[in-house]
Amino acid sequence: MENKETVFNTEIDKLIDSMDLTQEPPAKEPERQYWFMKKARQLVQEKEKELGRPLRACTVTFGCQMNSRDSEKLAGVLERIGYVETEDENADFVIYNTCTVRENANQRVYGRLGYLHSLKKKNPHMMIALCGCMMQEPQVVEKLKKSYSFVNLIFGTHNIYKFAELVVSALLSDRMVIDIWKDTDKIVEDLPVERKYPFKSGVNIMFGCNNFCSYCIVPYVRGRERSRNPRDIIREIERLVADGVVEVMLLGQNVNSYGKNLEEPMTFAQLLQEVEKIEGLTRIRFMTSHPKDLSDELIEVMKNSRKICRHIHLPLQSGSSRILKLMNRRYDKEKYLDLVRKIREAMPDISLTTDIIVGFPGETEEDFLETMDVVEKVRYDSAFTFIYSKRTGTPAAVMEDQVPEDVVKDRFDRLLKKVQEIGREMSSRDTGTVQEVLVEEQNSQDPHLVTGRLSNNLLVHFPGDVSLIGQLCKVELLECKGFYYMGRKVG
Ligand code: 5AD
Ligand code: SF4
């Protein structure tokens, strides 16, 4: 079978080969990066000769799907440069793609850096790079400079397209290379990507965020909102489909405001209709929706679509209108519940999931009970529940009345119990029906089973072999076990 994305990477390989290293690197992107990929390849080959073995690289991803997709871009460059990918952190090049949405994400990185240091002492050739959201925080970079001087390369979220160029700098330098940008309006297309799954892929449709929810660090670390050109998005998906992808996840911090800043503005619903037309693509997902921008047009398009999955992730954050105002969410409890009513009227089989924060500054027991009330009314299939984490630089960090830890913990436990109780009931509602399942992998515990995903995002395990991976199968849902099903393939 012709494999177009590989052909695409092969085309890039040809372009890389055609670069002339005796000349200065081109100023234009992505050609400039092709030049640096060739240069890095040369440096890696020299090192391989010196060590008498191939060099191995390991990328560790923290955080959200946006970061996972970024890591696939890093992997695309690493592969072109000649590193062999490994999951073992005892490698020649280790890259941590970090998250900073909550403080514990940062703590995990510092903890693991200690471990990496011990590995590096045994392998002095080891190169360590840190990138992603956490690096956009100036106090983090200060701390790394001071106490983690064994790190070779630090870069941020805005210049990830320069990875090849940065790797060359790090390979040629014996000091820490740091390159962090505050913001950018640049989007560089046509760089290589190595996908984790052959049959599904994330696709960035926009970058950054303009919402400034008062607790959230994302707008500060991912910059202002920028939409990708729809033609570039469609071209990327067409290439993916030609390479065997049947499901795409359109990614953005707030997909519902897609297209507002394009030269020829376009709505997210219109983009979805264009994506729907791509032949060979069978499933479309998207993440994340901000309730304030979810339009009637989108609900209508989803309702009439054969390809858009029956799932909306609709972060609530709090059920109290007073707290929502302090959070700068720009909807209240009534508006949120109205929106859910409209969605459910149009698509009764929709699965709704959410994010909720407990213990936002000033949250009272009454506020918390409003959140519990929304959870009972909406009946989510599942919910990610978070304890509020103070992020330096956000407006909420300096708000008064930070809630005591024991009170937050108690509320968190009550919320989690409620969310799980309802989630179990909701998840089981399709028992006995036959549904389409996209098979994703062999079951890790029982090799006679495969694991796939329903349109509504729930997992199903059923007897089958690896030849089914990447295929859509009709499966009878025999029994719901909490948050997944056991099933049987029918035809
Ligand atoms: N504290 C706790 N949770 C947070 N989130 C974002 N910022 C914070 C914070 N400061 C949660 C929100 C968001 C999800 C990705 O992370 O619920 O939707
Ligand atoms: Fe994703 Fe936000 Fe974490 Fe960055 S800070 S990885 S955008 S969740």
Image (cartoon, rainbow, N blue to C red):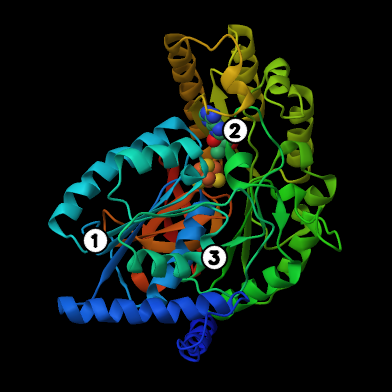
Q: Is residue 216 visible?
A: yes
* Kind of residue at badge 3: Tyr
The x, y position of residue 174, in whole percent, is: 30, 60
Which dot, 2 or 3, sits closer to the camera?
3
- The answer to whether the residue bearing label 1 lies less than 8 angstroms from the nearest atom of ligand 2 is no
Q: Residue at x 33, y 68 (%)?
A: 171
Question: Is 125 on the left-hand or right-hand side of 431?
Answer: left
Q: Please tell me which residue lies in front, 399 or 213.
A: 399
**Can residue 475 be seen in the rendering of this structure?**
no
Q: Position of residue 303 (x, y in %)?
A: 76, 53
Which residue type carries mark 1? Met
Residue at 24%, 59% (x, y): give it: 88
Mark 1 lies on a secondary structure that is loop
Q: CA distance from mark 2 to mark 3?
A: 25 Å
Name the residue rendered at 82%, 55% in the picture: 267
Residue at the disc numbered 1: 126
According to the picture, the residue beneath numbered tag 2 turns out to be 216
Q: Secondary structure at mark 2?
A: loop
Left or right: 215, with 97 as reference point: right
> Which residue is denoted by mark 3 in the rendering?
161
Q: Quadrant of residue 365?
A: top right
Q: Is mark 3 within 8 Å of ligand 2?
A: no
The numbered mark, 2 or 1, whose residue comes first in the sequence reads 1
